[in-house]
Image (cartoon, coloured by chain):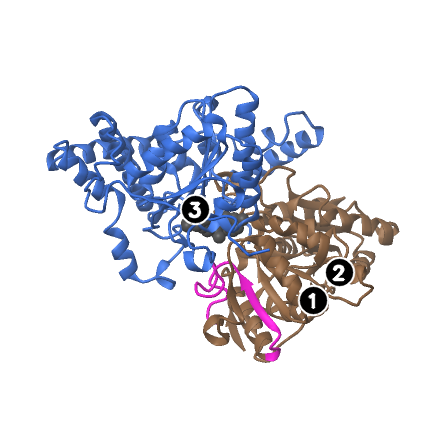
Amino acid sequence: MPRKPVAKFTIDHLQVLDEHGVVDAKLDPKLPDERLLEMYRWMRLARELDERMLKLQRQGRLGTFPPNTGHEAVSIPVAMAMGPKDWFVGAFRETGGRLVRGEPLTSPLYYYNGWEEGNILPDPALRITPVSVVIGCQVPHAAGLAFASRYQGEDAATVCFIGDGGTSEGDFHEGLNFAAVWKAPMVCIVQNNQWAISIPRSAQTASQTMAQKAIAFGIPCVQVDGNDALAMWVAINEALDHARSGKGPYLIEAVTYRLMMHTTADDPKKYRSEAEEKCAWEKEPLIRFRAYLAGKGLWDDGKEGALIAEVKEQVDQAVRAFEAPVDWAQDTAFDHVYGTDHPHLHEQRAEFLANVRFDGGKEADHG
Amino acid sequence: MAKLTMVQAINLALTEEMERDPGVLVLGEDVAQDGGVFRLTDGLLEKFGPGRVLDTPLAESAILGTSIGMAMAGLRPVCEMQFCGFSYLMMGQFEAHATRMRARTHGQVTLPLVIRMPYGGGVRALEHHSESREVLWAHLPGAKVVLPSGPRNARALLAAAIRDPDPVVFMEPKHSYRAFREEVPDEPEVLPIGKAQVVQSGTDVTLVSWGAMMRPTLKAAAEITGKRGVSIEVIDLLSIAPLDAQAITDSVRKTGRCVVVQEAPRSFGPSSEITALINDKAFLYLEAPVARVTGYDVVTPYFGREKHYIPSAGRVARALETTLDF
Ligand SMILES: Cc1ncc(C[n+]2csc(CCOP(=O)(O)OP(=O)(O)O)c2C)c(N)n1
Ligand SMILES: [Mg+2]
């Protein structure tokens, strides 16, 4: 018996817009102008919100949060391509996509200031799952959601996000494997921003690409320039078509860069060079998209200035709403432990309220 | 003697143990280059090199699973769970293997490993970063669960945990990481695991706690002593598995009254076990029912509401007065 290859695989890399905003005419999805402008507007808004959140955090007006700057071209085109019945299953660095999908700007503000109210959607029909802090857990959820969509006869797909670090968790592999075996309509987007806190991509996996992890499960995949919103648009549309047509899941590796600190509690100087960061800033997604729009005669400095003023005002309004006094009850935790009524919780709630009264509603002294 | 924070004291214990025993190594997410997200393992990489201080991929189950393999081969891995909220991903390895290997092989294979994890609330952190779930581990036979309360005992207990022949879950109260400093002796210290410390002796009531709750507990004890001139015995358990039944029994037989302070939700927590123990061993000495000051049986709220859910010195003081007045 001779030894011979039984399987061979290749991984494609897709880029439509280069760093200077030059478009590959053959690959250009030829989006209508208004869609392009809409895409840029979302990216600008997400960037503005992120920058404001960082300021608020530094001023003590917001808790710890993971900045999203640099990731706009990943989740925003994806969310724009999704239909109303599709499920958006985020990790925690897709604020832009969440906004596109219909989350109010106040949601991330509440959420990152320690209020569950930030998880409450204006309408559950938006089909956005809450931020998934525990890395990887959302992938099996997505496989289950995708299964359920098909079971319920919906022509819908589930889009799930995970980071490069997240691909090391068992749940990532287990979830993808289930989705593949079930041929579930799921798209997994690996947001490869080169870092998982201080762990570089090279120490996270010995695989040459993140995309190829899909091959092991029999899932088609592509590696995409994740700073290129048009490439993401092309890739997500192919992936959604694939998933919706009953062929099973699809995986997109979006190659991008975490331009900021992991969270506001992190200091990247401990583990990466400023030269590397500087180089990454030159490839960031907004610059090239703006150049592309300008090249098409759709954009100029005047329009940019007007848009920045407009999104600033929008963020200002959200911050004002977020900082307006609220009278949310302190004892809501007792409302949502179970869907059924339990006497021991009534007793404990009474005790809790008495204790809050006793402490005068002040910051309790925990030593 | 140097005045150290708990973070520095734990770092010192790791350094001393790694210097003492070449089989000791440190592994976990971000522990090497970054020095840990709390900077607790800072400097170890420089001192001991990447062969002994390992930045791992992001996978808790494999962090413990590989530690089990290393320990089977005779090494003494000290692995880190970045936050206790992520430790549940390794619970399968813990229950199925870490706690059972000794019994499974009648002692032929033992697992001298330590799992360090920051736990507890009060630091304005995101979801999953504020829980106190020591009971999940303590319930499993074969698991030792150690909870230091200050820099000095943290250093001495971690040394003991590393030298211990069995798996030890070492839960570090992150609220106390940098909240205060303590004199830590120059010479290495080792405290026995399973022995409580009477940090203040007294005759009128016994106050029992551990970990982060020792601070509000001691504050309340000082307040009530000043206010009422009573004599309060304060016990710091230091480990909840094994539990120092003797120390609790002796104290409650002497004082006849007991208040237990626990950060975790009330039901099925260590305070329930302690109350049952007192019922078994000291019932006839009791002048008042055992009182418990605990977290509530709710899902830990995000930090906007958290402050009222963590037992406060005021709550402990009120429970002390009720117990004294019974
Ligand atoms: C199960 C689990 N382990 C550890 C953590 C702590 N943690 C939070 S984010 C992170 C790194 C995530 O890296 P990656 O998946 O690449 O996402 P990115 O932060 O780069 O967006 C870690 C280790 C966590 N949240 N969940
Ligand atoms: Mg990453």
In-image side of A343 versus A306 (left or right): right
Identify the secondary structure beneath mark 1: helix
Question: Are the residues flagged by discs 3 and 2 in contact, CB closer than 8 Å?
Answer: no
Q: What chain letter is assigned to the residue under label 2?
A: B
Q: Chain of mark 3?
A: A
What residue does disc 1 label?
A: B72
Looking at the rendered image, the disc whose residue lies closer to the viewer, 3 or 2, is: 3
Q: Position of residue B258 (x, y in %)?
A: 75, 51
Q: Is residue A352 in view?
A: yes
* Disc ID at residue A211: 3
Mark sitting on residue B101: 2
Q: Amino acid at mark 3?
A: Ala
Magenta stretch: includes residue B256: no
Residue B35 in the magenta stretch? The answer is yes
Query: In this picture, which residue range is highlighted in magenta?
Result: B20-43
User: Where does residue A236 sit, x and y in percent of width and height?
Assistant: 37, 34
Question: What is the quadrant of the N terminus of chain B in the image?
Answer: bottom right
CB-based contact (under 8 Å), mark 1 and mark 2: yes
* Chain identifier, colour brown: B
Between circles 3 and 1, the one closer to the viewer is 3
